[in-house]
C-alpha cells in the first residue's frame, strides 16, 4: 500500500526461517517469500533497522541487493547473521558441543561413578542429568561464541549493512536517512 507514495521504515527483531518443523508449520517460509517479493517490488525508499537480531530468512529477504532503495542498518549491540547462535550450536556445530561435553570434568566424573559400580536406574538418571546440564551449558557457550563473531560489525564489513547506529542517535539517524532517501528517490 505504501509502494510508490511513501517510504517504509522497518524496525526489526527477526529470527527468520530456520527450517525447523515449527517454522514449517507456522508457514514462515511462505511469509518470508511474500516479504522478499514485497521488498523486491517496493517502489520507494526502505530503511531497515535491526534493533535486536536478524537471522536466517530475515537476513536474506532484507538484503540490500534485492532493492536499490533499501538501506539496511543496525543498532550497536544487535546481531546479524545467516543463522543465529542457538540454531548454529544445535545444527551446525553439534560435534563441537559433543566434544566439549565429553571433555568436561563433571561428565568425566559422572562416567567414572557410573562405570565403578553396577549401574542402577538412579545412577543412570544422575548421569543423564549431568549430561543434560553440561550439554545445555556447552550449547549456550558455542552459541555465544558464534554470536560474538557474527556481529553487526561483521555484517557491516561484508556489506550486508550500510552502517551501525548508536542507540542514542536512532531518531536523528533515521530522520537523516529518510530525508536523503526521499530526495534521492524524487530525483529519479
Image (spheres, rainbow, N blue to C red):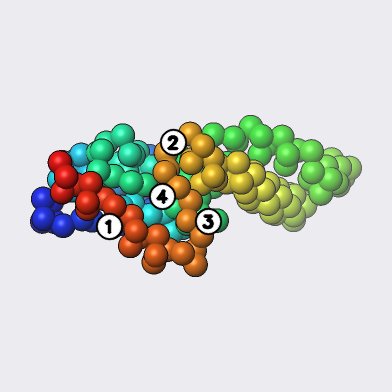
Residue labelled with disc 3 = 76
Q: CA distance from mark 2 to mark 1?
A: 22 Å
Q: CA distance from mark 4 to mark 1?
A: 16 Å
Which residue is at a point 48% across and 34% down the rendered structure image?
158
Helix, strand or loop status at disc 4: strand
Residue labelled with disc 4 = 73
Residue 136 screen position, x and y as percent: 64, 51
**Label located before the other in sequence (2 or 3):** 3
Judged from this view, the residue extending furthest toward the right is: 116
Residue labelled with disc 1 = 179
**Label located before the other in sequence (1 or 3):** 3
Residue 170 screen position, x and y as percent: 42, 63
Asked if marks 2 and 3 touch (Cβ < 8 Å), the reply is no
Which residue is at a point 29% across and 52% down the rendered structure image?
180
Which residue is at a point 25% across and 43% down the rendered structure image?
69
Q: CA distance from mark 2 to mark 3?
A: 16 Å
Instruction: Report whether residue 8 is seen.
Output: yes
In this rendering, the label closer to the viewer, 1 or 3: 1
Where, by quadrant of the figure, is residue 56 drawn?
top left
Q: Is residue 163 left or right of residue 33?
A: right
Instruction: Report whether residue 27 is seen.
Output: no
Q: Is residue 188 left or right of residue 85?
A: left
In this rendering, the label closer to the viewer, 2 or 1: 1
Q: Quadrant of the C terminus?
A: top left
Which of the two residues, 131 or 158, is positioned nearer the viewer here?
Answer: 158
Helix, strand or loop status at disc 2: loop
Residue labelled with disc 2 = 159
Residue 131 screen position, x and y as percent: 70, 48
**Label located before the other in sequence (2 or 1):** 2
Helix, strand or loop status at disc 1: helix
Looking at the picture, does residue 67 appear above or below residue 27?
above
Amino acid at each position: 500500500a505504501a509502494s510508490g507514495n511513501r517510504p517504509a521504515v522497518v524496525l526489526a527483531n527477526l529470527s527468520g526461517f530456520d527450517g525447523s518443523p515449527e517454522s514449517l508449520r507456522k508457514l514462515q517460509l511462505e511469509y518470508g517469500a511474500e516479504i522478499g517479493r514485497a521488498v523486491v517490488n517496493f517502489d520507494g525508499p526502505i530503511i531497515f533497522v535491526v534493533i535486536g537480531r536478524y537471522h536466517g530468512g530475515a537476513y536474506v529477504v532484507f538484503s540490500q541487493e534485492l532493492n536499490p532503495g533499501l538501506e539496511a542498518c543496525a543498532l550497536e549491540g544487535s546481531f546479524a547473521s545467516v543463522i543465529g547462535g542457538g540454531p548454529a550450536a544445535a545444527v551446525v556445530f553439534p560435534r563441537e558441543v559433543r566434544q566439549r561435553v565429553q571433555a568436561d570434568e563433571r561428565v568425566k566424573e559422572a562416567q567414572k561413578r557410573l562405570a565403578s559400580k553396577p549401574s542402577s536406574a538412579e545412577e543412570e538418571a544422575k548421569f543423564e542429568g549431568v549430561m543434560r546440564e553440561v550439554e545445555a551449558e556447552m550449547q549456550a557457550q558455542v552459541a555465544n561464541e558464534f554470536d560474538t563473531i557474527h556481529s553487526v560489525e561483521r555484517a557491516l564489513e561484508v556489506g550486508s549493512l550500510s552502517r551501525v547506529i548508536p542507540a542514542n542517535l536512532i531518531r536523528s539517524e533515521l530522520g537523516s536517512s529518510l530525508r536523503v532517501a526521499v530526495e534521492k528517490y524524487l530525483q529519479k
